[in-house]
């Protein structure tokens, strides 16, 4: 494939950022694609994010509640909750869910459009595919991931509260006070920045790989697999780097 | 003498390492019907897409006259061989998107009037709420004609316009091409049907292995 060289990839990234501004000027055309992307990536993922958040929050509290009680370090539980849910698992797990749901969908959809000459039809109609197809997906996925991360955090903390309530009879007020007392602005900022960066990575990798299809329909599953594996890898590496940087 | 509006100079184009177009130079004049013919795989479609600025050649120049160059997309329409309708959009969006792009202030009633107009031309009235997958290949091709004509372009590119069409629609397209010729619009057509070439082509180019 001619489009697999780093120079092409860099140009694609630059062009996407430039096209984000053009979305605003072509709002009457792009708004539908953007709102549909937020619907598919954000709204339709709410249930799975809620379920994952509640489950993860419950598991963490079950695991640490007994352990920390034995050590007499009950208050440490809230710090652990914030570190695991807000700083680490919230952004990365949300990103994984979005890669599995929307990353594959975007790569497959764009790949099919290329193979069926639909992209050429947009060009012939005077519509820039970067402005009409790539930039709204970039904005939609990034914005959705940012909001879903917040939602996951709430779900995780609510899940851990329910389990705490069952085992320790802690009131919601006490739980909430303890959580907010250990929660720092840096935790929220790191979590928000991570979710934004992961959204950027997933949308860029998925759209880039989708548009790499040249002619054959058989290329579509290949680019979908590539989009998923590269997104996973990049998110993990970037997460590691950001966590490392935040502690040192 | 007709005015030259598109000129191709020493065009070369490769795809996946294969030379598709090999040093082709040609021109298209205003108000004429130019037919590019040749066997399957001779490079007709690639040449047409290069001429319509859909594909970028590896080398060579594509020159447009100043009046065509300004708002080229608005002044041109393209009918794809395999329809290339947007599968995730309704038929209404498929046909009306060029209007939404070129005439953003046009209201829905005006758009519907224009759609009615092209439906009459093609004698086909599809349900605008349906999607392309709800129609046969031939019907999709007819809708792609509507999309190319809706903004009343001055120059129309047609890639294998008769492919996938039934006998009745072929006659309608031939009649349509005759009407476009009478209006002195510019047509560039690719086809591998010799009878079609002789009936309509004011200028005929034959491609063989990417060369004229």
Image (cartoon, coloured by chain):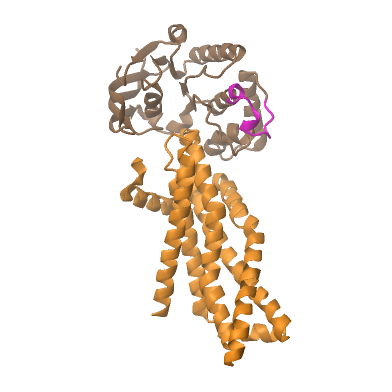
Chain colours: A orange, B brown
Who's the residue at 67% across and 32% down the image?
B128
Using the rendered image of the protein, determine whether residue A179 is visible from the camera's viewpoint: no
Give left or right: position of A87 versus A244.
Answer: right
Question: Which quadrant would the C terminus of chain B be assigned to in this image?
Answer: top left
Figure quadrant of residue A76: bottom right
Can the viewer see residue B83 in this picture? yes
x and y percent of residue A213 in the render?
43, 40
- Single out the residue that lies furthest toward the bottom: A72
Chain part drawn in magenta: B126-140
Q: Image check: A127 left or right of B9?
A: right
Nearest to the observer: residue B21 or residue A89 = A89
Which x, y percent locates residue B58? 29, 33
Q: Which residue corresponds to the image point at 52% horizontal and 79% vertical from the top-left?
A: A185
Q: Is residue A230 on the magenta stretch?
A: no
Residue B5's quadrant in the figure?
top left
Which residue appears at 67% of the width and 74% of the height?
A158
Relative to B108, say whether A57 is above or below: below
Whether B137 is among the magenta residues is yes
Q: Quadrant of the N terminus of chain B?
A: top left
Residue A162, image x, y percentages: 70, 77
Q: Where A58 falls versus A41 (above or below)?
A: below
Residue B140, given in percent of the width and then of the height, sits at 59, 26
């Amino acid at each position: 494939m001619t489009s697999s060289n780093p120079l092409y990839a860099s140009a694609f990234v630059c062009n996407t950022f430039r096209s984000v501004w053009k979305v605003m000027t072509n709002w009457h055309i792009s708004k539908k694609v953007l709102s549909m992307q937020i619907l598919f990536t954000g709204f339709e993922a709410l249930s799975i994010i809620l379920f994952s958040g509640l489950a993860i929050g419950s598991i963490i509290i079950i695991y640490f509640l007994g352990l920390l009680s034995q050590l007499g370090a009950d208050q440490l539980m809230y710090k652990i909750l914030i570190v695991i849910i807000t700083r680490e698992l919230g952004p990365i797990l949300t990103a994984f869910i979005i890669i599995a749901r929307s990353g594959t969908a975007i790569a497959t959809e764009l790949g099919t459009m290329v193979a069926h000459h639909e992209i050429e039809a947009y060009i012939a109609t005077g519509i820039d595919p970067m402005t009409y197809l790539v930039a709204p997906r970039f904005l939609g996925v990034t914005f959705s991931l940012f909001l879903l991360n917040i939602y996951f955090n709430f779900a995780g903390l609510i899940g851990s509260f329910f389990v705490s309530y069952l085992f320790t009879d802690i009131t919601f007020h006490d739980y909430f006070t303890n959580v907010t007392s250990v929660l720092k602005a840096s935790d929220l900022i790191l979590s928000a920045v991570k979710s934004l960066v992961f959204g950027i990575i997933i949308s860029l990798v998925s759209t880039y790989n989708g548009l790499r299809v040249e002619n054959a329909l058989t290329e579509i599953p290949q680019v979908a697999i590539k989009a998923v594996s590269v997104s996973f890898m990049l998110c993990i590496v970037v997460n590691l780097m950001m966590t490392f940087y935040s502690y040192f | 003498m007709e005015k030259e509006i598109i000129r191709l100079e020493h065009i070369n184009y490769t795809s996946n390492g294969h030379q598709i177009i090999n040093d082709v130079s040609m021109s298209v004049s205003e108000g004429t019907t130019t037919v590019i013919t040749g066997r399957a795989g001779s490079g007709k479609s690639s040449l047409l897409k290069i001429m319509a600025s859909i594909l970028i050649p590896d080398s060579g120049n594509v020159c447009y006259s100043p009046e065509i160059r300004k708002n080229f997309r608005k002044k041109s329409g393209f009918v794809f061989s395999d329809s290339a309708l947007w599968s995730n959009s309704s038929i209404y969006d498929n046909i009306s998107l060029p209007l939404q792009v070129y005439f953003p202030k046009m209201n829905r009633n005006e758009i519907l009037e224009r759609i009615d107009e092209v439906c009459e031309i093609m004698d086909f009235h599809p349900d605008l709420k349906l999607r392309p997958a709800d129609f046969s290949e031939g019907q999709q091709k007819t809708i792609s004609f509507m999309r190319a004509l809706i903004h009343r372009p001055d120059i129309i590119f047609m890639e294998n316009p008769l492919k996938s069409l039934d006998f009745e629609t072929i006659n309608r397209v031939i009649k349509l091409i005759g009407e476009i010729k009478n209006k002195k619009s510019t047509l560039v057509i690719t086809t591998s049907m010799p009878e079609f070439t002789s009936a309509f082509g004011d200028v005929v180019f034959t491609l063989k292995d990417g060369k004229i």
